[in-house]
Image: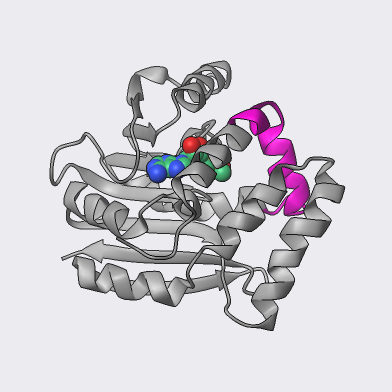
């Protein structure tokens, strides 16, 4: 079990907050990031272009899922409500729904066979996983050999810079988004580990070529790895 996590009551509370955010999800994300979040998701979407089978874990209302370019896309999220909304939004966007499969399950117990995915990705969701070590073991299991895994999320820093990011999320983003939801995101940021911490767990879990990249003055990270 990874010690860096929120407790189970807080996790349930987080899920409620995320579900309440659904009608304004993209708007809040865009305001918090000054419109940059779409460009960041494109990094993952572009990576999926030459991968047959993609699995997005923590796919939420489908914001990244509808940008993925793989021929077959599994959207995995523990919230049935999120999956329903994602399905609706993808359909409304005119994207063929046949290539999507929606699975209501957590990252810690993914109901997919071993070695099925060419690409697994998480965008602004890894931070929310209840047991990240278990989730990484599951992701490694479902990836094919030489398959690729990418995480996009807010970068935790255990220093003054991290405190500044925490305060930005907790105190500034509720004002610029006119929403209290980001306050819950501040809690998950607080309980989050650094990208280096998860890179080490990934190496122990059996991933190779683990690389960390930073975006936007190191406030955002992209962690990429392949399965041995
Ligand atoms: C902030 S949303 C991210 C949505 C989407 N990936 C995007 O690009 O915006 C985080 C999602 O992670 C999901 N989540 C939370 N805990 C999870 C877990 N243990 N396993 C998988 N997904 C989880 C939530 O239900 C939520 O839909």
- State the residue at coordinates (72%, 54%): 33
- State the residue at coordinates (43%, 58%): 151
Residue 195 lies, in percent from the top left, at 46, 71
Q: Is residue 225 in view from this perspective?
A: yes
Residue 105 lies, in percent from the top left, at 33, 33
Answer above or below: position of 101 versus 196.
above
Answer above or below: position of 42 versus 219.
above
Magenta span contains residue 47: no
Provide the residue span drawn in magenta.
19-36
Q: Residue furthest bottom?
A: 159
Query: In the displayed structure, does residue 7 sit left or right of residue 204?
Result: right
Q: Quadrant of residue 100?
A: top left
Query: In the displayed structure, does residue 135 sit left or right of residue 17?
Result: left
Q: Which colour style is shown?
A: one colour
- State the residue at coordinates (70%, 68%): 165
- State the residue at coordinates (69%, 54%): 36
Residue 14 lies, in percent from the top left, at 56, 41
Query: In the displayed structure, does residue 43 sit left or right of residue 17?
Result: left
Answer above or below: position of 200 versus 224.
below
Magenta span contains residue 34: yes
Residue 153 lies, in percent from the top left, at 53, 58
Q: State the predominant SS element of the stretch in magenta.
A: helix
Q: Is residue 30 or residue 24 the one in the foreground?
A: 24
Q: Is residue 186 or residue 151 the one in the foreground?
A: 186
Q: Is residue 64 in view from this perspective?
A: no
Task: State the quadrant of the N terminus.
Answer: bottom left
Answer above or below: position of 130 versus 64.
below
Q: Quadrant of residue 186?
A: bottom right
Count of labels in the image: 0
């Amino acid at each position: 079990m990874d010690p860096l996590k929120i407790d189970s009551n807080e996790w349930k509370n987080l899920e409620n907050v995320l579900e309440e955010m659904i009608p304004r999800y993209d708007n809040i994300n865009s305001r918090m990031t000054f419109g940059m979040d779409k460009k960041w998701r494109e990094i993952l979407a572009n990576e999926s272009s030459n991968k047959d089978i993609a699995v997005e874990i923590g796919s939420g209302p489908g914001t990244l899922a509808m940008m993925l370019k793989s021929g077959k896309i599994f959207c995995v999220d523990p919230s049935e409500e999120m999956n329903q909304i994602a399905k609706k939004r993808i359909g409304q966007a005119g994207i063929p729904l046949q290539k999507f499969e929606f699975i209501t399950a957590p990252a810690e117990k993914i109901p997919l066979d071993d070695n099925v995915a060419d690409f697994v990705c998480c965008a602004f969701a890894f931070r929310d996983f209840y047991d990240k070590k278990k989730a990484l073991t599951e992701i490694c299991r479902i990836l094919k050999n030489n398959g690729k895994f990418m995480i996009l999320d807010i970068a935790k820093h255990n220093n003054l810079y991290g405190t500044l990011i925490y305060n930005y999320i907790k105190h500034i983003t509720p004002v610029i988004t006119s929403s209290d939801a980001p306050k819950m995101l501040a809690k998950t940021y607080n309980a989050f580990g650094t990208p280096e911490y998860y890179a080490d767990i990934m190496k122990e879990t059996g991933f190779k070529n683990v690389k960390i990249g930073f975006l936007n003055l190191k406030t955002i990270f992209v962690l990429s790895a392949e399965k041995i």
